[in-house]
Image (cartoon, rainbow, N blue to C red):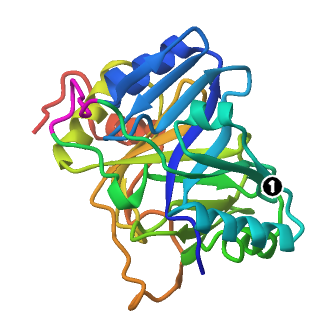
Amino acid sequence: MTGVNELAYVVYEASDLADWEHFAVDLLGMQLAGKDTDTLALRTDEKAYRWLVRRGPADDLVASGYEVADGAALDAIAARLAAAGVAATEGDAALAASRKVDRILVTADPMGNRIELVTGFADAESPFHSDVLLGEFVTGSGGAGHQVLLSKGVARETYLEFYEGLLGFRISDIIVEELAPGVVADLIFLRCNPRHHSVAFGDMPHPKRTHHFMVEVTDIRDVGTAYDRCMDAGQPFEMTLGMHPNDHMFSFYVQTPSGFSVEYGWGGLLVDDETWQVKTLDRLHSWGHRPPEAVASLLAKASPAPGEDAR
């Protein structure tokens, strides 16, 4: 099946662009590609941008851009959407120019998330540069990274009909874990290239459309230095350092100024379609990824009382 090739970009709406610029550039190591009073464009590689953050009250995801190979591939997906009765509209020249693409087809998934299917996503005019990274962000054929979205009560078979049946995603694996008595996280992970997943969907309590976006780096030291920068800046953490059992990502989770999180990771697994077998796992984390308040409590218990010998 002709499907999408990668998660090319995301568009967020945020109430405080100044905080976002500091967070993305100074703490995460992105490059500011451009800004005006209402929009930030952020780079992580040779592309013109990977994140667009525009001013607004939602503080949430407002669009996901997926690139396809060419116009013929876009036409094939458009035909499948039409045959399935899914509304899709070809974007005009102004929208295509604002997204820096040749063509754009706009539709929505069953949860109501705006999906932009694009061709010809432009490169920037200059090489990527970060003032703080030791290495680079991992993008290339794997796209911008991955995102985990909330299913919002929509049945799994319904959104799989859209993502798997119409857009050509493939299932990597499933994780089901009881987080607390009566609270179960049930996630399914989908890929469209060798990256273990470009999008995942969770059936779990969460107030926003998106739980997190993951950016991956080539140098493990950048995970540590970003962790320190976020800690020194007082940026709230969702989870401390840890590793996932399915994609093997070594990472931490830090909250954006909009309240959802960024996973900042290294060492993500690449999938070989010829040999990969779908599994259901029973835990989200191999180790670590603890809430910061739990770590603080454990460290306090392990610390000697005033006047006691620390040995």
Q: Which residue is depicted at the point 38% across and 66% down?
A: 286
- Going by the picture, which residue comes out furthest to the right? 85
Dominant secondary-structure state across the stretch colored magenta? loop
Q: Nearer the viewer, residue 141 or 292?
A: 141
Q: In the rendered image, which quarter is residue 165 located in?
A: bottom right
Q: Which residue is mark 1?
A: 88
Q: Position of residue 279 (x, y in %)?
A: 52, 84
Instruction: Read off the magenta span.
Output: 126-134
Q: Secondary structure at mark 1?
A: loop
Q: Nearer the viewer, residue 300 or 50?
A: 50
Q: Which residue is depicted at the point 74% across and 58% down?
A: 151
Quadrant, the C terminus = top left
Q: Is residue 125 left or right of residue 8?
A: left
Q: Is residue 65 left or right of residue 302?
A: right
Q: Position of residue 113 (x, y in %)?
A: 74, 48
Q: Nearer the viewer, residue 153 or 56?
A: 56
